[in-house]
């Protein structure tokens, strides 16, 4: 349907792909800085998500949930959390407040 047509058009646009890739890399670097400032250590990820260890992972997970921020936790590694990139300025600000 329409979504496939839009996606195909976007992916065939080399300039758009380059700009989107550059923007997501900048977002990932921004998220890395926020994680480190919040006491975490980035242990992996892609340009769309970051995985980090926090000394207080379970408590931080609860704080994030209370703020309406969904992250993935790992049952076998309670210190580990996976963050997706926030979708807008409000999301970035909310995440920043919790990580401070």
Image: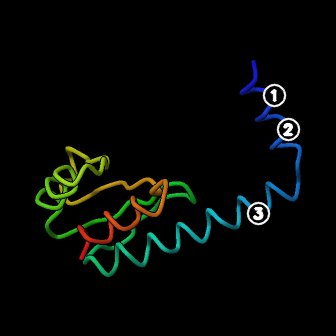
Asked if labels 1 and 3 touch by Cβ distance under 8 angstroms, the answer is: no
- Left or right side of 96 for 50: right
Q: Residue at x 39, y 58 (%)?
A: 91
Disc on the earlier residue, 3 or 1? 1
CA distance for labels 3 and 1:
20 Å
- Left or right side of 16 for 25: left
> Which label is found at residue 9?
2
Q: Residue at x 25, y 47 (%)?
A: 74
Q: For mark 2, give the secondary structure.
A: helix
Image spot of residue 99 (x, y percent): 26, 71
Find disc 1 in the rendering and name its residue: 5
Q: For mark 1, give the secondary structure.
A: helix
The residue lying toward the viewer, choosing from 67 and 41, is 67
Asked if labels 1 and 2 touch by Cβ distance under 8 angstroms, the answer is: yes
Q: Compared with residue 79, is residue 35 higher up or lower down, i.e. above or below?
A: below
The residue lying toward the viewer, choosing from 27 and 52, is 27
CA distance for labels 2 and 1:
6 Å
């Amino acid at each position: 349907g329409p979504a496939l047509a839009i996606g195909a058009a976007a992916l065939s646009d080399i300039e758009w792909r380059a700009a989107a890739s550059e923007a997501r890399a900048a977002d990932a670097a921004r998220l890395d800085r926020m994680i480190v400032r919040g006491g975490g250590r980035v242990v992996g990820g892609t340009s769309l998500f970051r995985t980090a260890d926090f000394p207080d992972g379970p408590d931080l997970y609860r704080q994030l949930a209370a703020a309406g921020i969904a992250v993935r936790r790992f049952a076998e590694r309670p210190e580990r959390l996976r963050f997706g990139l926030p979708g807008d300025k409000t999301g970035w600000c909310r995440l920043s407040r919790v990580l401070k």
